[in-house]
Amino acid sequence: MAERSTADLALTLTRASRTPLPVQVADGIRALIMSGALAPGDALPSTRFLAQRLSVSRGTIVAAFDQLISEGALLASQGRPTTVHPSLPAHLLQQVSAAAPDPTAASTRRPASPGASTAAAPGRPDPVPAPAPASAPAVDLRPGLPRTTRIGGAAWRSAWRRAAAAPEAETGGLTGLPDLRAGIAEHLRLMRGLTTDPAALLVTAGSRDGLELILHALAAARGTLSIGVETPGYPGLRRVPQVLGHRIVPLGVDGNGLRVDALPTGAAAPDAVIVTPSHQYPLGGSLSLDRRLALLEWARNEDALIIEDDFNSELRYTGAPLPPLSAIDPHGRTVLLGTFSRLLSPDLAVGFVRPTGAALLAELRDVREVLGVRVSATTQHAVAHLLADGTVRRHTRTERLRLGRRREALLAAMLDVPGVRVLPMHGGSDAVIRFDDGGGPGGVGGAGGAGRAAGADAENRAVAACADAGITVGRLSAAWGAESQAAPVDPSPAAAVGGVGGAGIVLGLARPADGAFSAMLPRLASALATVHHTR
């Protein structure tokens, strides 16, 4: 594509807004790209020129550009102007610029009439027990465990006292308390850049409850479903469709998230896919803008629903949180699945579902009328207070900084450990460690029978060595399901984050206290060094 002239950006900043200026700049440029006002290949003004024109610091513009480059919306080349990424499909961008689905449109699918509720399956696999040596305290690094010690302060106690004093008549009905839905909508606006009508939200008892609700609504129209799941992926959610009697279709991933180019089509296409575009679990990849647009186009062509699991999206410590798929969905093919359990406490079963259009929203309400509301009014009131007074946002920002520092400390501790590779990650509360053997792009645990056997052996020895050191860790192999043999694997070195049957360990960075975490790192390094030496 020939290089275009430098674009004259029509951006308006509101200094009185609570939205930071770099975010406003990034949002404005992103909107120009989506609308077609900026086309793939268009050159942007220099950061210095744009800063002078908008009367902001150059750092503000640099931060906005860096965010859009990380999303894959812009391309920076040394000695050349920053451009709109040439690989973005122009015809899909034009579709996104069309009006969003009419929120008042009537549903064309018949009302849901599901049977009795089926309880969701347990979450992550049981960890290997970790007996602590007498000389060192045990440290729990199982993935998915949030820190809760700092949440139980004055704000937490005040929220529950006020919730207990709320009138008993305030139940929120089928969709949840209005104050909670308003708080969730404001949270999505401030933390995810997504404008949401509170009336378009349904309160749930967490991600699994929300997923069950969606699958019941979809099955009412289609019968037994085929559900695509990322492989590897979050074990807890991938079990829910199976418990409900639906078929699992494994979908391949690489270092950039879901392999959209390898999605099944035609008769083989699943009815829905469960994706984590902002932070793929457990490998941490984020879908670039061109992949996001291609995924939306695939869903439209295949009449499929995209279930977006907002996994750890707020805990991105490199750049700002990426906008959800719902923000660029012009066809009403997405539903956002969120929870506060991972951020605040696993015992706090509160989440939400946010469908793109009113058609699915009406069907979800039909299902909720049959299954009932699983979140007590008291819990809803408490979370609403925590959202309204800013506790959740402050806690999120604190955790984001804290986890970024912990990841840097982990990288430093592993630097001199032979055969150990910490996978790159831009956010989240977990870290993945693989073991290299120099025998190919995938290292130990790559594709092939010998690689899987070697990987399983290395994983077993790593888990055992950590247990001997008093450290409980998670197994990377647990993120692969039994059906994963069908998942496509990219054999290229750039994508070698783990093939079918991939092995390694997953570390949850959030739960230990600061002193315990720092003291544990030398023990972890020593334990993992034995994996290489005993190979």
Image (cartoon, grey):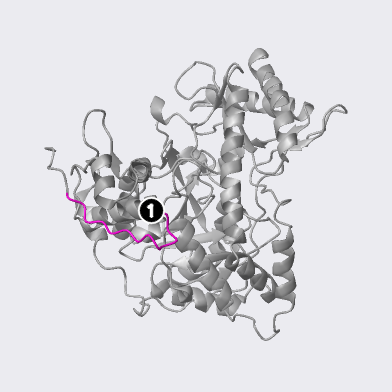
Query: Crowding at label 1, few (<14), some or many (≥20) Cα neighbours within 10 Å?
Result: many
Query: Could you say where residue 499 lies in the image, as x and y percent from the top left?
Result: 48, 32
Q: Is residue 14 magenta?
A: yes
Which residue corresponds to the image point at 19% horizontal and 55% vertical from the top-left?
Answer: 37
Query: Could you say where residue 76 lies in the image, as x and y percent from the top left?
Result: 28, 35
Query: Could you say where residue 384 lies in the image, as x and y percent from the top left?
Result: 61, 70
Pick the front one: 194 or 398: 398
Query: Can you see residue 292?
Result: yes
Direction from residue 6 to residue 353 in the image, left or right: right
Direction from residue 534 to residue 492 in the image, left or right: left
Pick the front one: 36 or 242: 36
Query: Could you say where residue 344 lies in the image, as x and y percent from the top left?
Result: 65, 56
Where 12 sits versus 322, above or below?
Answer: below
Where 406 sits versus 314, above or below?
Answer: above
Which residue corresponds to the image point at 60% horizontal and 66% vertical from the top-left?
Answer: 389
Pick the front one: 226 or 180: 180
Where 182 sits versus 192, above or below?
Answer: below
Question: Based on the displayed image, in which of its 4 quarters is residue 109 positioned?
Answer: bottom left
Q: Magenta segment, which residues?
A: 8-20
Amino acid on which the number 1 mark rests in the picture: Leu
- What is the magenta segment's predominant secondary structure? loop
Direction from residue 254 to residue 33 in the image, left or right: left
